[in-house]
Amino acid sequence: MKIKKFLFILAFVISFSLFSFSALNSSSVINFDFYTYKGEKYSLQKFKGKYVLLNLFTSYCPMCLVELNTLNKLNQICKSNEYKIISLLVDKEGMPLLPKIVNSRNLTYIVGIAPSDIFKIFPDFSITPTTYILNQNGNLVERVVGYKNLKDWTKILNKYVNCN
């Protein structure tokens, strides 16, 4: 009985790892349009040539809201113009709160509303916060799940751009 359970878990882990690996090495360009709470329309294609830290968050996630502050600090201390930080709210119920979230934190980077098909674009997205790092061509190069502090984010970003 224990061997069957172990083999099942092992098969699941291997399958999940292969799926995750293939998703991260996808050669398809990720591009979609989104809006800020002010109604400004953006396309990820606009940021071609830069690394994009695409942070997905919800209004009811305490660690997401803390990470917005962390990403704002990262944006302020890392003056490289080789990257862009974008945070997108995924819960539509939180849309009325978005102006307050942005203004109360004095966020200086782009914060918008995720398109309705965000779960199709990122089928592996299930935990907030999750940040997808896209390379200069718009290909997914890394997925960061869960809250990270400023030191962690600086280390992660330094893999792609000089942030010292």
Image (cartoon, rainbow, N blue to C red):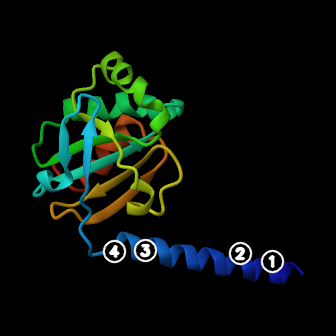
- For label 1, the residue is 5
**In terms of depth relative to the viewer, which is nearer, 93 or 82?**
93
**In terms of depth relative to the viewer, which is nearer, 23 or 14?**
23
Secondary element type, mark 2:
helix
Q: CA distance from mark 3 to mark 1?
A: 24 Å
Q: CA distance from mark 1 to mark 4?
A: 30 Å
Residue 75 position by quadrant: top left
- The kind of residue tagged 2 is Ile
**Who comes first in sequence, dot 1 or dot 4?**
1
Q: Which mark is residue 21?
A: 3
Quick check: 141 above or below 10? above
The quadrant of the image that shows the N terminus is bottom right
Secondary element type, mark 4:
loop
**Who comes first in sequence, dot 2 or dot 3?**
2
Q: Residues within 10 Å of mark 4 (few under 14, many from 20)?
A: few
The quadrant of the image that shows the C terminus is top left
Q: CA distance from mark 2 to mark 3?
A: 18 Å
Secondary element type, mark 1:
helix
Secondary element type, mark 3:
helix
- For label 2, the residue is 9
Q: Which mark is residue 25?
A: 4
